[in-house]
Amino acid sequence: MIAVAVVTVLVLAGGIGWLRMPVAVPLRGAVAGELYLPRWSLGPVPGAVLLHGSEGYGAGATRRFAYELAQQGVAALALCYFGCPGRPSTLHDIEIDQVFRAIADMDAYPGVKHGDVTLIGFSRGGELALLAGSQDPEPRAVVAYYGSPQVVASYPSGAPDAWLMNGVPFPTGMEIPVSGIRGPVLLFAGARDRIWPSSFSLDVASELAAHHHPYGIRIYRDAGHGFGGNGSYDYAYAVGRGGGTAQGDQAAARASWAQTVAFIKSLTPAYVAGPLPAQPVQAPSTPGQGAATAAEVAALALLVTCWATGVDADPRRRPHPWLMRRLEPAWTDWEALTWEQKTVITRRRQAVAWVFAILTAAAIFTPLVASAARR
């Protein structure tokens, strides 16, 4: 029985892990990057296009983040706009039209909700998300991690013309018209950012508030420049240059990622959700996304126990006295029962075990099905 239970746990755990593992899908057309889709869903899922920063696409951060979003039921495209084959080697003369092409490809992809693709950018990618969002004629939600309210020069040369649209450059120093974004905006920043201060995000928030634009902003007290993802990384690498503390970056990553996923899933093409809270908050200490909760583990253990009890029921095995009294109050002396009477009690015991197993399985999978149906 123990061996059966162990094998069952391993099979169920492996199956759940496999279902949570995203699928990498080859991109079509002129879009460069990597697309990750949830392995299963009961309907169309929301989409997201992720934009890397000045470190370039090769650093791989946005690819990891796209994979994590797909684990949470979001189709995610990590777009390469420089730093990969077929794209510029540095952040200079970057056509933002490729962002619109990526959105269009995601929007037309089978299984992705039409009109429900969010732009998510980090650092220079946050600047690009705000800029592209302001030029997009379609409704578009934007999430900007430690972005800029202005157009910044090329990197690393410092030359003008970092961004182009149809060959026409956006002037360096131009205020990004964020109020032109046709969707809600979510902003994240670190109070100890040494590269782009949190005042940049506050400037964006002030502009949005002045135009009564739906937005939310979170500034994390001990975070610097470089937090993102579900908090499962070592953020010490970003502290030296970007400021903050490794613990602060990790806490900010966990909190902001949970809020980003919830934000994306709460959206509809009509953007019926109201404005988000607009006050800075400190990142709470929350567990990483995707980890099994204690309730899930307990429910899985109960399911395995019920299943093993039902399968292993044997007329030769005496049930617990408490269970026996409830299965047949008149038969209290197990040794005095006939084989037929023991068989009757055993079948009832199996039925009870299977009922508990079915109810437990329903308790585990019903929230998953309901969550998938809402996407």
Image (cartoon, rainbow, N blue to C red):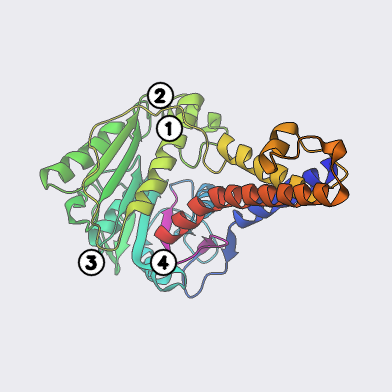
Q: CA distance from mark 2 to mark 4?
A: 34 Å
Cα separation, mark 3 vs mark 2, equals 37 Å
In percent of width and height, residue 189 lies at 34, 35
Q: Is residue 151 above or below residue 193?
A: below
Task: Answer with mark 3 or mark 4, whichever residue precedes in sequence.
Answer: 4
* Badge 2 vs badge 1, beta-carbon distance below 8 Å: yes
Among numbered discs 3 and 1, the one appearing first in the sequence = 3
**Among numbered discs 2 and 1, the one appearing first in the sequence:** 2
Which residue is identified by label 4?
A: 102
Q: CA distance from mark 4 to mark 1?
A: 28 Å
Q: Mark 2 or mark 4, which has the lower sequence index? A: 4
Start and end of the magenta stretch? 33-52
Disc 3/disc 4 C-alpha distance (Å): 15 Å
Percent x, y of residue 129 = 33, 53
Q: Secondary structure at mark 4?
A: helix
Instruction: Tell me the tag on residue 276.
Output: none
Dot 2 falls on a residue whose secondary structure is loop
* Residue ID for mark 1: 252
What residue is pinned by disc 2? 222
